[in-house]
């Protein structure tokens, strides 16, 4: 796990990147602070109800130590000042950061939407099939079977029930929008 700090969107200044070394499943959680309570919620969301919480490796930041203690998760830390002991986490964050830059550049969307791009980059990594397998498949037992839309593409979407009063009676039911990612629930489960 590793946190990165970039400020924008709805006030999110930090992001927690979590990677399951067994399945290579990665997730990104933007947040406004890096308090241990936020880290706890993000870890619980990453694990979900069906994934066992066996062990966590981090850079040893105090919010990680406190969160692991509160969640009763065994915790190992990297050696302070020894870059090579945290190289996997740094490489994961670096890869995700590069993907976010590319997604924002290719979509033409502004930097303020980086939290959406980061979550999407993690999703794209998880659902990418290589040699018949993907991190999503290793975690859920089968590869992603849904559509894969490009980040920032134009989509036709159903407006929320509260805004349907503003649409003309005989106008189209769908309205134009921009695709910013999938609705992934706790534990990495997708609900349409």
Image (cartoon, rainbow, N blue to C red):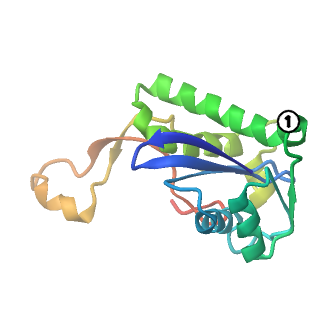
Q: Quadrant of residue 69?
A: bottom right
Q: Is residue 106 above or below residue 158?
A: above
At which x and y percent is residue 140?
A: 75, 60
Q: Which residue is drawn at 63% across and 33% down?
A: 97
Left or right, 60 with respect to 114, comes to: right
Report if residue 66 is visible in the image.
yes
**Residue name at image x 51 percent, y 59 percent:** 192
User: Is 22 in front, or is 112?
Assistant: 112
Q: Can residue 129 be seen in this view?
A: no
Q: Who's the residue at 19% across and 59% down the image?
A: 163
Residue 71 % position (x, y): 74, 75
Rendered image quadrant of residue 101: top right
Residue to which mark 1 is pinned: 83
Residue 86 on image: x %, y %: 84, 42
Specify whether 31 is left or right of 159: right
Q: Please state which of residues 184 and 45 is positioned toward the viewer in this rendering.
A: 45
């Amino acid at each position: 796990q590793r946190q990165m700090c970039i400020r924008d969107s709805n006030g999110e200044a930090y992001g927690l990147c979590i990677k399951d070394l067994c399945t290579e499943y990665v997730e990104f959680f933007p947040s406004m602070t890096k308090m241990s309570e936020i880290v706890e919620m993000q870890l619980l969301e990453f694990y979900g109800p069906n994934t066992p919480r066996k062990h966590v490796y981090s850079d040893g930041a105090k919010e990680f130590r406190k969160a692991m203690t509160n969640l009763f998760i065994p915790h190992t830390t990297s050696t302070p000042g020894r870059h090579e002991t945290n190289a996997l986490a740094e490489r994961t964050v670096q890869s995700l950061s590069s993907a976010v830059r590319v997604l924002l550049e290719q979509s033409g969307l502004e930097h303020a939407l980086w939290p959406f791009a980061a979550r999407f980059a993690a999703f794209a990594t998880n659902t990418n099939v290589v040699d018949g397998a993907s991190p999503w498949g290793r975690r859920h037992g089968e590869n992603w079977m849904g559509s894969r839309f490009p980040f920032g593409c134009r989509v036709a979407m159903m407006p929320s029930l509260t805004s349907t009063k503003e649409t003309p009676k005989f106008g189209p039911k769908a309205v134009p929008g921009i695709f910013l990612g999938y609705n992934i629930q706790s534990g990495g489960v997708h609900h349409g």
